[in-house]
Amino acid sequence: MSDIAIELKGIDKSFGLVHANRDINLRVRKGTIHGIIGENGAGKSTLMSILYGFYQADRGDILVDGAKTDISGPSIAIDKGIGMVHQHFMLVENFTVLENIMLGAEEGQILTSGIARARNELKRLENEYALEVDPDAIIEELPVGLQQRVEILKALYRGAEILILDEPTGVLTPAEADHLFRILAQLKAQGKTIILITHKLREIMAITDEVSVMRRGEMVATRTTADTSVEELAELMVGRRVLLSVEKGPANPGEVKLSVRNLTVRDSRGVPMVKDVSLDVRAGEIVGVAGVAGNGQSELLQAIAGIRRAETGNVTLNGRPIDVTGEADPNELRHRGLAHVPEDRHHMGLVLKFEEAENSILGYHDDPRYLKSFFLDVEAIRADAAEKCARYDIRPPDVRLKTANFSGGNQQKIVLAREMERDPDVIIIGQPTRGVDVGAIEFIHKRIIEMRDAGKAILLVSVELDEIRSLSDRVLVMFDGHVVGERSPETGEGELGLLMAGVTDQEAAE
Amino acid sequence: MSAPHAKLPGWVDYGVIPLVNLVVAFLVAGLVVLLVGESPIRAAALLIEGAFGYGEGIGFTLYYATNFIFTGLAVAIAFHCGLFNIGGEGQAYVAGLGVAIPCLWLDASMPWYVVFVVVIFGSALMGGLWALIPGYLQAKRGSHVVITTIMFNFIASSLMVYLLIDVLKPRGSMSPETRTFAEGGHLPKLDWLFGPLGIDVGGSPLNLSFLLALVVSFIVWVIVWRTRFGYQIRTMGFSPSAARYAGMKEARIVIITMVMSGALAGMMAINPIMGEQHRMQLDFVGGAGFVGIAVALMGRSHPVGIIPAAILFGMLYQGGAEISFEMPQISRDMIVIIQGLVILFAGAMEHMFRPTIARLFTSLGGGRKPQPATATE
């Protein structure tokens, strides 16, 4: 037995021309929590997929417990005691917890004996690791935090000694995340080895023993967590020093530009997602909407932008009403000075298969600047796009490159450039830095502040509490479709977290 | 994240891969020929000789290709909008009325070029109308165009049988077809164009509609890639949610695109009716509407790809006829099998060889500049 649970030697993997992992070396000591951190696209997930047998490395060796192992599929990884908790859960939503845990380990065609065994084993695991969950609950009725717990139990049920968690806190409230960390600490105390993949520096500092940093497919450093700092890790991730906090002066709010009253919106299944929401956004201020994903923020933005029909409510833009319950037209709203940076740039904000220049006119394709009667003025469009590339530092500055080939940060800059360069009065922004690398985050945040200082009214929705707190002048918290409280951005994370988790305004303030 | 397929240079994507698919399709077809006891090499030689070996063969090949260009463009423009119009067959069939009626009405009094102009609009109008209903149902009622267009093929078929037998057939005639048009209903042949090139297309039905097909191909390119409406079509096709975000009128775009698609399919009717037979016969479309799907798939929905793909299928039609004439063992159905194989490999299994080719390409030094996992900052 060695004290190294996993050792990767010279792992190399390419997808066609994309070199996702190059010559990766990694040692994970037994009974520790080892963090792997890096920007989106740094190759973390690819590396873990190789370890779990989804992909095979082009070169390099994997040593499990000191023995060279050929992991040619997930079943081999499971045999070797490696379990994985995916970012997007691999659960059958309308099965019970027990059924999900047994999935793939049913032990025969007749389930009765398997079920009994699984139930006992589950009880044992629950006791041992303090992972309570009702075995007969239906998955889709469980909150996300519990679903994740089921994923962990599933791995343990299969005898996992080494657990890989891929971005486990992306969908959790701060309280749920804290609970997860306690579970992980417990597992570590029981001798399990944990590999935690994340791009959140705070989590690394809070829970890991050691941390490895990846950048552009390479493993650039491994540090003992106690001996490093957030600043050092951030620098290693992006390769240069970045500003994590945003510099901004005091806000100078003017008249109300966007006003929402008693807005109620249902989703496509008829479930009310936004319930009786009222808010105002003034010129020259940023109003942040905090909340765990799925509490109505997306629908709120879409209803204001005219993309989703609201059921009831009044919205005014520059003092004139928007017909949000009827045929509000995104096109007309654009002409009236509303810019919209949508949450989902891949499906809404951009057409990934378009050339960059084609995306730079999406929604503004009626502008006479881009047209010669019925025809597109391709030269004018490209020249305009090239100008935006220069001003927003979009790289590569190739307006004919397919948008899918830009990195996440540059894609987001394409959207921002398009929406902000129109000199709108009101900007509604959803998840401005989701899937964006640290370098670009800094740039995007600066632009948003600049727009505020130029007197724009900005409504900002983000699931990143840090982002909301550093950008906003006022913070609204949404939970279950309601705005449950308003706070100043200096309010402690704990208090905002409580609000996000549905604790009432009063209780949270105490 | 890293894409599973790396980006290949254009000439590999649009040249090598279709070629490999085609070669494999012909190899498998060769096995079939071998199975019925004939020599695949001789069959191939007959096919090429029949399609391109002599002037008349070339004429026939291009005549068939003309049909497929129109129907291929029809399928392609709908593809760009994310619509799968498999009703080209019915749209072209009904559009026959837009050709035959002006011809019957004007053939004795007007010169062909006047009738031609009327017929272009007539066929486009009828084809477009026939596609309007499925388009409307898709846009406003959510009835899937795949279902409605295929159903409309059957309706078109019954309707045309009725019209040809009970309405358009001259009294006393035994065959379900219109009367033969007078001079004004005949499109000129293309001998004058091919003659100087030393190709005698004399006996073939190749006519002016071939040039119309080329002009229309260019117009389709302009519409799709150079107009605001084309921009909206492509946005809808790639991402309906982006179209909604951009404030585009989705229903309107779907309906107009379907009408355009139907109009393109409809213009195909000019070629056999006014170009060849000089009368409208039962089943004059002869499956061209369906071949158009394969042509659009193979041609990557781009006119520059559709024209060669249409010529390829024209070659299969013409050369295939030649094979079945020379090799009694091989019936016309065999030709359909070969066409099916081409569709299978070039359309349905388009990406089968892609990873292998990408790997080969990388190892052959095309990957001298491997990109990092994301586009460089």
Image (cartoon, coloured by chain):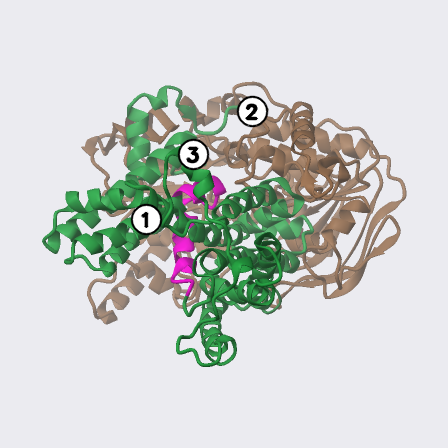
Residue A445 in the image: state x and y as whole percent: 68, 31
> What subunit carries mark 1?
B
Q: Please, what is the three-letter code of the amino acid marked with disc 3?
A: Pro
Mark toward the viewer: 2 or 1: 1
> What subunit carries mark 2?
A
Q: How many marks?
A: 3
Residue A426 in the image: state x and y as whole percent: 79, 43
Q: Which residues are magenta?
A: B284-308
Give the crowd class for mark 1: few <14, some 14-19, many >=20 residues within 10 Å. few
Mark toward the viewer: 2 or 3: 3
Q: Residue at x 26, y 52 (%)?
A: B320
- Contact (CB < 8 A) between labels 2 and 3? no
> What subunit carries mark 3?
B
Chain B pictured colour: green
Is residue B287 a member of the stretch shown in magenta? Answer: yes
Q: Secondary structure at mark 3?
A: helix
Q: Residue at x 39, y 78 (%)?
A: B174
The foreground one among A111 and A425 is A425
Q: Which chain is brown?
A: A
**Marks 2 and 1 belong to one chain:** no
Q: Please, what is the three-letter code of the amino acid marked with disc 1?
A: Met
Q: CA distance from mark 2 to mark 3?
A: 50 Å
Residue that numbered label 3 is attached to: B196
In the rendered image, which quarter is residue A274 located in?
Answer: bottom right
Residue that numbered label 2 is attached to: A396
Residue B317 in the image: state x and y as whole percent: 32, 52
Task: Report if residue B6 is visible in the image.
Answer: no
Q: Please, what is the three-letter code of the amino acid marked with disc 2?
A: Pro
Q: Which mark is residue B349?
A: 1
Left or right, A205 with reference to A499: left
Q: Residue at x 63, y 32 (%)?
A: A413
Q: Secondary structure at mark 1?
A: loop
